[in-house]
Image (cartoon, rainbow, N blue to C red):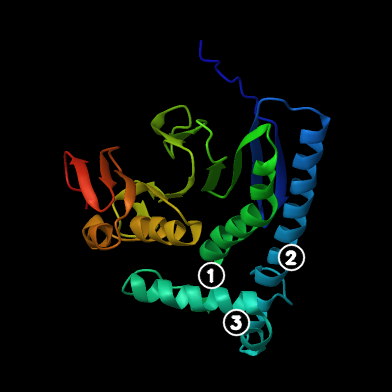
Amino acid sequence: MMQIKKYLFPSTTINQMNMNFKIEIATTNPDSSIMEQLNSASDGIAEMLAEVDRDFSLFKYDSLVSRFQRGDNEPLRTSNDFKLIYDSAILAEQMTAGLYMPYFAGKYDPSDLVKGWAIERAFEEYLEPLLKNQNIDGIWLSGGGQIKVATKSGSDFRWSIDIRDSEKENEIVTTYYLKNGVISLQENIIDGSLHKNQSGVKQAIIVGTNLVETAIWALVATSNKAEKFLPFVERYNLSGILIDKVNEPLNFSKGLVVSSKEKLS
């Protein structure tokens, strides 16, 4: 008879960069050594995120971003991380034909990109090594609408990820069952005649392999009319869901729109 594994999901929460980050593992035996590894990884991630906040915060006067906003170009020459983010932001602007722009109120602001990059970096450095433990089958890191998960090679475990309506937390839009991958969630504030932008998209869910990319596409999807976004779905083989202001979903998978009762505008 096939033995069914029973998983437990110990987790920790970190508050950094003005948001909560959740670290979770799937384990069959949450003994003291497992918890020590989880807490050690959590401490390392907290320290890394504090460094990211120090360098990229829009609210710290001496951050690299604040200095760059004031016309100081030295961060481009002295910080590999800053240059990486800057180059990625410029590339994203080009890939989206200018629909994504790393500016807010005329000032350089790569916040959405930084968030995805920070999770990717912390995940690789502090969580992936945990999969070497025979009693850990899955790892999870999320924050600010960005989720990244992985499963040990050879394991049948899958993460069950409920995507909830951005306006009704008790309503589940869909559930993804992932071994490895990322999900970026972005919502658009629509309140009567008051819109954050002209998009009719209330919520975007983008599924992929890298949060730096999916975070940008989710932002583009909620910042523009769907007719502007959909050509990129085919061009870049995107997967996910757009939900409009009347809760009509548009599903797309690997570049193909697979269901749409009514075209979003």
Residue for badge 1: 110
Residue plotted at (68% across, 65% down): 52
**On residue 59, which mark appears?**
none
- Disc 2 crowd, CA 10 A, few/some/many (<14, 14-19, 20+): some
Q: In front of the other: label 3 or label 1?
A: 1
Residue 194 visible from this viewpoint: yes
* Amino acid type, residue under disc 1 in the picture: Pro
* Amino acid type, residue under disc 2 in the picture: Glu
Where is residue 199 shown, x and y percent of the image?
30, 56
Using the image as rendered, state which of residue 22 and residue 60 is in the foreground: 22
Residue 251's place in the image compared with 161, above or below, is: below
* Amino acid type, residue under disc 3 in the picture: Gln
Using the image as rendered, state which of residue 139 and residue 81 is in the foreground: 139
Residue for badge 2: 51
Work out whether mark 1 precedes mark 2 in sequence or the reverse, and give the earlier one.
2
Residue plotted at (65% across, 70% down): 56
Residue plotted at (60% across, 55% down): 119
- Report whether 96 appears left or right of 128: left
Using the image as rendered, state which of residue 85 and residue 57 is in the foreground: 85
Residue for badge 3: 69
Query: How far is mark 3 from mark 1, CA to CA?
Result: 11 Å
